[in-house]
Amino acid sequence: MRSPPAPVSPASGTLLLATPVKRPAKRIVAGVSAAGFTDLGAIAVLWAGLGYAAWTDWRRREVDDHVWVIMGALGLLLGAGRIWAGAGAASGGSLWRELGLWVLVASFGLEHFLPWDERLGRWREWLPGIIELGLYLAVGGAVVAVAFADGFVPGVVAALAAYLGILLARVLFELRLLYGGADAKALMVAGVLLPLWSTPWLPLPRSATAILGAYPFALTLLMDGAICAIVIPIGLAVRNLRAGDFEFPRGFTGFVLRVADLPDRFVWVKDPTFDAEADEAETSEDDRKVRERQRDELLARGVEKVWVTPQLPFVILLAAGAVAGVVLGNIVFDLAALV
């Protein structure tokens, strides 16, 4: 005989993987549970925070770490409130162990936004890396230990999803698949604010939403953001066609710019080519100085126009992915379910 399927909490979008026990009823206000209110709060912080980060990254190509600290701290508090109000009170595991594990994982995410490693690195350059590796192993071990003791109850699943989101962002950053530190931090903080989201606002195939109950939202956000990137080559092609500068295939990846405008535009010069000096720029001001030197050299050679590729902040796409993830769920899963 088949066992009944695991129930899904409609308010928090969390898959209940443990058998519920009788506890005091959740508080309901206007048809929304307290856990549901914490989810709405997390979504509001996520959208507002990533929206502001996208705007500052577009204007200056830098995002102040205070943005991530505030978002991460609110994520820690909202996540604890979600466990207290909903998932922890409805599961058979220890509420206090779930809360303790959540605070540990969320605090681990927060440490990535603080400059402790820079200060410690001045004393021993190798020490921050050793400490951080130990933290990854210790926090991961704590998640496994609590899951072994209590099972995959909602608080443990949320902590595991947040931890996997942090780990994913760090691995992609180290592999230089997420080039900017802001991109990795945005992914980390998204995982802390909304570890799981299995109830998209638009009605979708049940097979698509069922997977999301145990699927890290940070990965959904990343996949949706990558899909949103399809508008970039389309937009560049339209721009080049209107200007009469379209050439296949580079008309989908760049555009023509006056050399005199180079210092004021966030771009990479692709034709004519230069040494990979711009890749070594650590700040937006360093990058601007590189473009100033390129401008002076090109003007001295009599070049007036160049082919450039825009430096588009990936945080903008992650912000779009955050909206798509909440409203539509995982677009890849949605499309697969319709096939």
Image: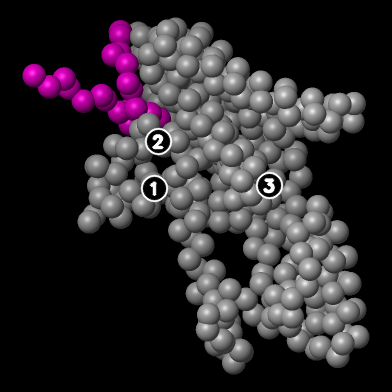
Mark 2 or mark 3: whose residue is earlier in sequence: 3
Query: How is colour applied across the structure in the image?
Result: one colour
Residue contact at pointers 2 and 1, CB within 8 angstroms:
yes
Mark 1 or mark 3: whose residue is earlier in sequence: 3
Spatial CA span between label 2 and label 3:
23 Å
The verdict on residue 15 being magenta is yes
Q: Position of residue 293 (x, y in %)?
A: 89, 72
Q: Which numbered circle lies on residue 182? A: 3
State whether residue 294 is above or below residue 128: below
User: Magenta region's main secondary structure?
Assistant: loop
Q: Position of residue 56 (x, y in %)?
A: 72, 54
State whether residue 306 is above or below residue 31: below
Tell me where the magenta segment starts and ends, as one range.
Answer: 1-22
Q: Amino acid at mark 2?
A: Tyr
Does residue 64 appear to the left or right of 323 in the view shown? right
Mark 2 or mark 1: whose residue is earlier in sequence: 2
Give the class, few, some or many, for how many residues have Cα within 10 Å of label 3's Cα (few <14, many ≥20).
many
Total number of numbered labels? Answer: 3
Q: Amino acid at mark 3?
A: Ala
Residue plotted at (68% across, 50% down): 180
Give the class, few, some or many, for how many residues have Cα within 10 Å of label 2's Cα (few <14, many ≥20).
many
Which residue occupies the foreground of this view, 202 or 313? 313
Which residue occupies the foreground of this view, 25 or 261? 261
Residue carrying label 2: 215
Q: Position of residue 125 (x, y in %)?
A: 84, 31
Residue carrying label 1: 330
The verdict on residue 298 being magenta is no
